[in-house]
């Protein structure tokens, strides 16, 4: 159990979005129902509350290695609507894991909404792994709404790996991510998304490769079930000798709808940019193969989806 004053619902949500089942040893800031529920800093990582607006500033000293920051958010009261601003100032030559994510459990009649604005300023030669998971639960009629906005500003030869996951329970989400890369910087984005019921999800990425030898790889894998709908809109702009790749690979089921809009803009003769998009249903031969092993059709579908989103 996490050694903080967080109830059982909050503990469960933190486990879902941050894979935390005990108090982490590194830096952390827990936010529960619009209030800070716990904070810890280290010699190299400081967390300071903003003044005048909701949010925190995270300062990571140069040369910080093998440390982590966890900043999960939990909303378990119906009717909460909040916008939170978190800024990360990451020094040169760092190697750090940052785990965010938001879980909403709504058992009431009113919508619950969390809009998180995260800005990353990544120093030279630093390597950052960023994990953001979204999760919704609760049997109320109120919606679970998450609208993350992420800005990434990368200095020379820095690397940012982003894992964005939303698999269950979020009624509406609109994700907007922008990134600006200087020379030698590398951005890797892996998005995993599943919608069901009447859920809607919009993912937008705008990546500007501004420096020589900068690279970006933006890949989304998604499944749309029931009457849900998804939009994936990724734009990579090459303003220097660079390389960029964006890919959307989706499974559509039932009455789902998926719109994929990969976009490229080259403003330099040595900008090498590629996009791919594929939308289709589960192949019949895959289902038959698994069903011959004793699985029902529903079980076979779940196995295929789980493997696809892994």
Image: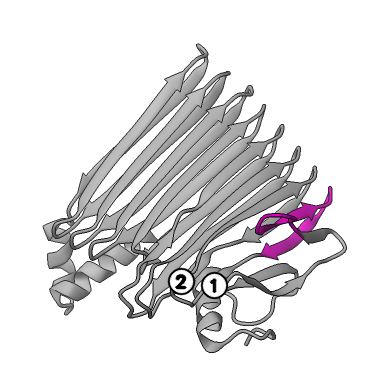
Extreme-top residue of the structure: 269
Indicate the position of residue 30 as horizontal and vertical percent values.
65, 71
Instruction: Using the numbered discs, state the Cα–Cα distance from disc 2 to disc 1 in whole angstroms.
Output: 6 Å
- Label 2 belongs to which residue? 104
In the rendering, at what x and y percent does residue 54 appear? Answer: 65, 59
Visible residue check, residue 308: no
Q: Does the magenta stretch include residue 52?
A: yes
Q: Residue at x 70, y 63 (%)?
A: 69
The part of the image, by quadrant, that contains residue 282 is bottom left
Above or below for 273 versus 136: above
Q: Is residue 146 left or right of residue 178?
A: left
Q: Check disc 1 and report the residue beneath it.
A: 74
Magenta range is 49-70
Q: Is mark 1 on a helix, strand or loop?
A: strand
Would you say 201 lies left or right of 185 here? left
The quadrant where residue 125 appears = top right
Disc 1 residue crowd, few under 14, some 14–19, many 20+, Cα 10 Å: many
């Amino acid at each position: 159990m996490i050694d903080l004053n967080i109830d059982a619902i909050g503990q469960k949500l933190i486990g879902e979005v941050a894979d935390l089942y005990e108090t982490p040893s590194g830096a952390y800031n827990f936010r529960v129902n619009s209030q800070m529920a716990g904070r810890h800093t280290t010699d190299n990582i400081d967390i300071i509350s903003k003044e005048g607006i909701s949010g925190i500033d995270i300062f990571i000293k140069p040369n910080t290695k093998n440390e982590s920051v966890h900043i999960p958010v939990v909303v378990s009261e119906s009717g909460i609507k909040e916008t939170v601003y978190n800024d990360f100032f990451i020094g040169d030559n760092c190697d750090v894991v940052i785990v965010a994510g938001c879980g909403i459990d709504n058992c009431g009649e009113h919508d619950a909404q969390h809009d998180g604005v995260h800005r990353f300023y990544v120093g030279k030669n630093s390597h950052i792994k960023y994990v953001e998971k979204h999760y919704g639960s609760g049997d109320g009629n109120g919606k679970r709404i998450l609208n993350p906005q992420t800005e990434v500003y990368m200095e020379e030869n820095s690397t940012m790996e982003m894992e964005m996951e939303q698999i269950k329970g979020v009624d509406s989400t609109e994700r907007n991510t922008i990134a600006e890369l200087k020379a030698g910087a590398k951005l890797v984005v892996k998005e995993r998304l599943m919608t069901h019921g009447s859920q809607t999800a919009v993912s937008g990425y705008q990546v500007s490769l501004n420096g020589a030898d900068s690279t970006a790889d933006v890949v989304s894998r998604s499944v749309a079930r029931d009457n849900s709908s998804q939009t994936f809109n990724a734009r990579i702009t090459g303003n220097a000798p660079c390389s960029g790749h964006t890919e959307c690979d989706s499974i559509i089921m039932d009455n789902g709808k998926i719109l994929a809009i990969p976009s490229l803009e080259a403003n330099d003769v040595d900008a090498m940019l590629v996009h791919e998009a594929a939308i289709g249903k589960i192949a019949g031969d895959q289902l038959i193969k698994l069903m011959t092993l004793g699985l029902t059709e529903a079980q076979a579908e779940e196995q295929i989806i789980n493997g696809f989103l892994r």
